[in-house]
Image (spheres, rainbow, N blue to C red):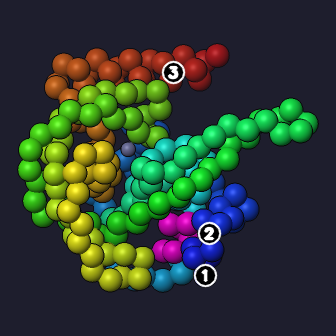
Amino acid sequence: MCYDNFLNNYKHEGESLKIEIWPSPALSKKTQKVESFDDDLKCIIKNMLFTMYSTPGIGLAAPQVNVNKRFFVLDIDYKREKVTLPDNTEEYHLDEFNPMVFINPVIKSKKGEILYEEGCLSIPGVYEEVKRAEEISVEFQDIHGNQQQLDTDGILAVCIQHECDHLNGIVFLDRLSLLKRKFIKKKFLKERQRDRDE
Ligand SMILES: [Zn+2]
């Protein structure tokens, strides 16, 4: 199947998916549980990883590519380096992949508090500090449908909470204070409108 060899050759094997930009309705829906762990699921996951690596980002949830299902991909470890080719064009070389796939995730417990500056591929250009749990325990299924459990903290815990929010129709701006949320949403919409007009 496409997924297994993907990382050796991700550039030639993926398809770039269109990322939904806030306030797309796809980002505010509650998602459906994944029931079948078939080739279609593996292919969409492979294409989500491709899209995440090439955009680039560190996490991408199904609703962000308009798939109304409970799963996401992330990789907080890969390295991205700009190289100049002999003909002077530039491209990025990626290395040290550590892709993770969480299907039907449930955060079972949370501990502590951490403030971390978050961004989102669906809200490009916006970075804000969000308060999250510092440590979490999450249960999920892997790409084969096997039940898994992970206890983690720090940036990985933050990412998992951010992506789980997407599965419940929540974007990170919704976690800010009302005043800040209103201000940033308004500014973001204004800037996008201006980009469209130009
Ligand atoms: Zn996001």
Q: Position of residue 181 (x, y in %)?
A: 25, 25
Give the residue type that dot 1 points to: Met
Q: Nearer the viewer, mark 1 or mark 3?
A: 1
- Residue drawn at point x = 54 percent, y = 81 percent: 39
- Residue drawn at point x = 42 percent, y = 55 percent: 74
Q: How many marks?
A: 3
Q: Position of residue 26 (x, y in %)?
A: 40, 50
In the image, taking residue 41 as reference, residue 33 lies left or right, namely left
Q: Residues within 10 Å of mark 3 (few under 14, many from 20)?
A: few
Which stretch is magenta?
A: 41-46
Q: Identify the residue position indicated by label 1 in the image.
A: 1
Give the residue type that dot 2 points to: Phe
Image disc number at residue 167: none
Nearer to the camera, 97 or 159: 97
Give the residue type that dot 3 points to: Gln
- Find the distance from the CA under tag 1 to the CA under tag 3: 42 Å
Q: Does residue 79 sit above or below 46 in this rendering? A: above
Image disc number at residue 193: 3
Image disc number at residue 6: 2
In the image, taking residue 111 as reference, residue 172 lies left or right, namely right
- Find the distance from the CA under tag 3 to the CA under tag 2: 37 Å
Q: Confirm if mark 1 falls within 8 A of ligand 1.
A: no
